[in-house]
């Protein structure tokens, strides 16, 4: 079983040291990811989802720093790696597709150039065979006439096409783990669907594990095996997907699930979660969700431990004690 | 592409026409050159009329303008009213000095300004960045005549290292080209730094790092190529300005260039020389702008298509 775990994050803490104080963007999260598995990380903006991704890639922006925990990738702690070693892992082992795939391509270089420079890191081959590989990759992500497309600049392609190119680049070095950060927020509905299908496709072709970072439970339901709900820098609930939908244990998850529109029932107003997520540099002493929680009681003055509510299902809420 | 160049050329010709009219009128408005030429004691009405006739000033303004234009098309701007030499010869004598100085200044500004700007962005907030900022602010704030005089004082009078006037050898270029270059260098550094910072924060640079490219590759290939686009525009405009002759610098360093020719022409109401110098400047300005536009198309493929 342990051989099948490609990523194990334990008690990861990524803090930002700003002039006004320490912002605990990621505050002690733990999760595991098996080979070929798909994990959804769900939460509102500012809950630490993206910072979790940048932490795994070793690209936490200034003034942030990973201050604690471990990130085991194939049994090695990434936090002990040098800059150079991390660079070797990026792209070949772990890759990420960012929020807006359309701005991820450099406007002044051709698509072929951007693919070939990536392939060059993986294969020591003459330019011609690298270009052949590049064309194959484009064909894999269903781009018609891939040979001709190599000479295109990004702006000569449609949005959907560019996404595919970004997809092709991200799998060029056959990574074991692909992170997709808010893969659909910037896209319109038809392209969203195409894109999700593309990512699923990529996963089937490469057998890569995927982490989906999203605030959309709809995507989680469609794409993921497991799901972790993040709130204020912590994972408040974690389980297999069906289990989470059928038996949410944390009040925050319940609220999130209620705010997903349901097409079968006719409602005038969608339920929303009262209040604002807390500011990360001024967290309440106890459970960070307590101020917005309809079930809050005295016990919530203290931060809840992680309770196992079912096999492979944990929740950080005193109700589950 | 050719259509684009064609349109630009036509626009350039139109601009030249407008400038020709402006400079023609301006030289006619600034006083009567016949009065400057004639010795005050021996100025009979007849002498005055004779001189005016000789200079072609007796004709009506539209006629004079047509004569000026007709000559200008052929590159003939008439005779200098001082020494009766063809203005074209004066121009050709002075042009190389200005071209050399302008190109030397520009090369210096680019060769030093671009790498310093990039490094300031990459090593943001380091001692290096702060030092570069000070150097740039000084370059932009200090007036050229003052910088020139201070450098002459330091390198010419005190250290006696460099010549401070004339244009005999390569060492003569050092001081004037640096004075010309400093403010442009400063502009390039600041612009380079800010556009580089912006580009370094872009998604495509982040993605280049995510795919595992080396930092050097990311900075010098992916980021630089994009950051250079605004620098190119700025450098082009600056170069065009330098080609107009740096009046102050040429004056201080006794540099026999276009700027001094123009200044002397204005002071002497030598209107053929002023007209010729202004038209030449305008021509080089427009030509440089055109070349920059074409380079721009090559630098940024988004414009090409």
Image (cartoon, rainbow, N blue to C red):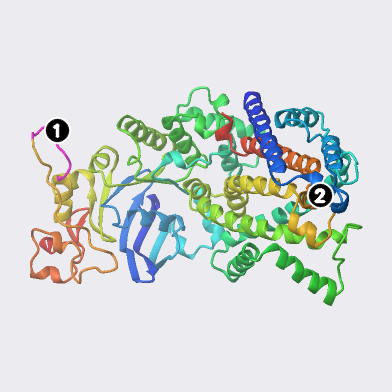
Instruction: Identify the residue under disc 1.
Output: A263
Left or right? Give the position of A257 relative to A219. Answer: left
Range covered by the magenta-colored residues: A259-266
Is A92 in front, or is B137?
B137
Residue A292, located in which quarter of the rendered image?
Answer: bottom left
Residues packed near mark 2 inside 10 Å, few (<14), some (14 to 19) or many (20 plus): few
Is B199 in front, or is A131?
B199
Q: Does the magenta stretch include residue B24?
A: no
Instruction: Identify the residue under disc 2.
Output: B36
Q: Is residue A265 magenta?
A: yes
| Protein chain holding label 2 | B
Up-down: is B47 above or below B153?
Answer: above
Q: Position of residue A244 (x, y in %)?
A: 18, 48
Residue at the location (14% across, 63% down)?
Answer: A291
Residues at marks 1 and 2, CA–CA distance in whole angstroms = 93 Å
Between tags 1 and 2, which lies in front? 2
Q: What secondary structure prevails in the magenta region?
A: loop
Up-down: is A94 above or below A316?
Answer: above
Q: Position of residue A108 (x, y in %)?
A: 57, 39
Is B57 in front, or is A16?
B57
Residues packed near mark 1 inside 10 Å, few (<14), some (14 to 19) or many (20 plus): few
Residue at the location (52% across, 39% down)?
Answer: A172
């Amino acid at each position: 079983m342990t051989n099948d775990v490609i990523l194990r994050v334990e008690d990861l803490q990524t803090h930002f040291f700003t002039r006004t104080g320490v912002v605990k963007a990621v505050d002690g999260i733990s999760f595991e990811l098996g080979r070929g598995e798909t994990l959804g990380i769900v939460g509102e903006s500012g809950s630490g989802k993206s910072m979790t991704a940048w932490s795994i890639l070793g690209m936490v922006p200034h003034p942030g720093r990973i201050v604690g925990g471990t990130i085991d990738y194939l049994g090695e702690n990434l936090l002990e790696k040098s800059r150079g070693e991390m660079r070797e892992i990026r792209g070949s082992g772990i890759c990420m597709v960012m929020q807006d795939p359309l701005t991820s391509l450099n406007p002044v270089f051709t698509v072929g150039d951007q693919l070939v420079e990536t392939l060059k890191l993986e294969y020591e081959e003459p330019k011609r065979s690298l270009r052949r590989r590049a064309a194959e990759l484009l064909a894999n992500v269903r781009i018609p006439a891939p040979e001709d497309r190599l000479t295109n600049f990004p702006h000569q392609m449609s949005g959907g096409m560019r996404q595919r190119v970004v997809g092709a680049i991200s799998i060029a070095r056959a990574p074991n783990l692909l992170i997709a950060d808010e893969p659909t927020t910037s896209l319109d509905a038809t392209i969203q669907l195409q894109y999700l299908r593309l990512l699923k496709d990529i996963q089937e072709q490469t057998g890569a594990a995927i982490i989906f970072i999203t605030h959309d439970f709809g995507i989680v339901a469609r794409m993921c095996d497991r799901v972790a709900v993040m709130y204020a820098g912590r994972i408040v609930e974690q389980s297999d997907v069906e289990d989470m939908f059928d038996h949410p244990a944390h009040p925050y998850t319940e609220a999130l699930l209620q705010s997903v529109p349901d097409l079968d029932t006719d409602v005038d107003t969608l339920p929303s979660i009262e209040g604002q997520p807390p500011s990360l540099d001024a967290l309440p002493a106890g459970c960070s969700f307590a101020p917005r929680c309809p079930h809050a009681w005295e016990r919530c003055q203290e931060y809840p431990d992680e309770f196992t509510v079912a096999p492979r299902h944990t929740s950080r809420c005193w109700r589950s004690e | 592409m050719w259509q684009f160049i064609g349109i630009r050329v036509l626009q350039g010709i139109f601009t030249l026409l407008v400038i020709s009219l402006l400079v023609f009128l301006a030289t006619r408005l600034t006083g009567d050159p016949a009065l400057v030429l004639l010795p005050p004691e021996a100025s009979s009405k007849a002498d005055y009329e004779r001189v005016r006739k000789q200079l072609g000033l007796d004709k009506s303004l539209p006629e004079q303008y047509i004569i000026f234009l007709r000559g200008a098309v052929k590159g003939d701007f008439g005779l200098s009213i001082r020494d009766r030499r063809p203005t074209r010869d004066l121009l050709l004598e002075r042009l190389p000095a200005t071209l050399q100085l302008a190109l030397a200044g520009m090369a210096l500004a680019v060769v030093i300004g671009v790498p310093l700007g990039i490094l300031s962005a990459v090593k943001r907030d380091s001692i290096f960045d702060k030092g570069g900022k000070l150097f740039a602010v000084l370059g932009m704030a200090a007036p050229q005549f003052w910088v020139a005089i201070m450098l002459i004082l330091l390198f010419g009078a005190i250290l006696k290292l460099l010549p401070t006037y004339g244009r005999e050898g390569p060492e003569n270029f050092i001081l004037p080209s640096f004075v010309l270059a400093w403010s442009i260098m400063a502009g390039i550094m600041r612009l380079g730094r800010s556009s580089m910072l912006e580009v370094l924060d872009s998604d495509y640079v982040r993605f280049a790092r995510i795919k595992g490219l080396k930092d050097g590759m990311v900075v010098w290939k992916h980021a630089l190529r994009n950051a250079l686009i605004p620098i190119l525009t700025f450098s082009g405009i600056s170069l065009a300005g330098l080609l107009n002759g740096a009046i102050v610098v040429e004056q201080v360093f006794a540099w026999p260039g276009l700027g001094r020719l123009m200044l002397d022409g204005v002071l002497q109401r030598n209107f053929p020389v002023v007209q010729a110098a202004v038209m030449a400047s305008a021509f080089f300005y427009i030509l440089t702008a055109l070349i920059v536009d074409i380079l721009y198309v090559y630098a940024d493929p988004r414009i090409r298509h």
